[in-house]
Image: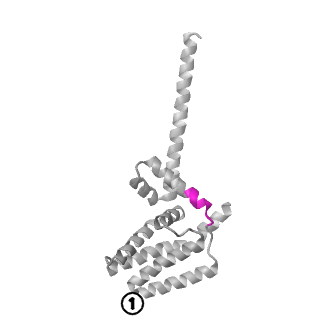
Amino acid sequence: MDSAQVIILVVAVIVGLAIVAAAWMYMQKRRTEQLRSRFGPEYERVVETGEDRRKAEAILEERQKRVEKLDIRPLTNEDRKRFQQAWLREQALFVDDPQRAVAEADRLIGEVMRARGYPVGDFEQRAADVSVDHPMVVENYRTAHDIALKDRRGEASTEHLRKALVHYRGLFEELLDNRIAVAKEGRR
């Protein structure tokens, strides 16, 4: 090989590597944009609490894969009505017994999640699972749960409990909305 061929080969390799690097960077940027769009504020929370962006994005992708394997389903009309009536009772209970109302709201959220097909074991796993389909209200869920835990330790005021109930309501209303589950069923 003469020097001209070597130069052409080196340039071709460099150009090829540049194209591969540009494609890789584009795919990473696209991945980030898709995850940021899908998870909204939850994306930022996971990135901020993690070691680096790539690990945080891997965590979010793993959540997505886990939830895709779950049988998340719409509520029946009967279940929706039953849960709506139960929620109205919990809200009314707040006037006389705010602590019990918040505890019952937490329990009711778990019931709705179970009826929809979410596993309801560990709280952090529940919040992670919910974040896939309900990223805009998962922080409400965390806040309400934290207040409920404070209440168990006797550290929550009535105003805190009121805020917890409002936060639970945000998630409750989204869980009763069947549009996400119906859309998922259509993709299967």
Q: If the image is split into quadrants, where does the C terminus sit? A: bottom right
Residue closest to the eye, 10 or 110: 110
The answer to whether residue 118 is magenta is no
SS at mark 1? helix
- Mark 1: give few (<14), some (14-19) or many (20+) Cα within 10 Å: few
Residue closest to the eye, 119 or 85: 119
Q: Which residues are magenta?
A: 64-71
Q: Residue at x 58, y 56 (%)?
A: 65
Residue at the top extreme of this rendering: 2
Task: Inspect this view and state whether residue 130 appears.
Answer: yes
Q: Main secondary structure of the magenta part?
A: helix
The residue where tag 1 is placed is 96
Q: Residue at x 38, y 76 (%)?
A: 163
Q: Up-down: is 48 above or below 186?
A: above
Q: Up-down: is 69 above or below 34?
A: below
Q: Amino acid at mark 1?
A: Asp
Task: Inspect this view and state whether residue 137 appears.
Answer: no
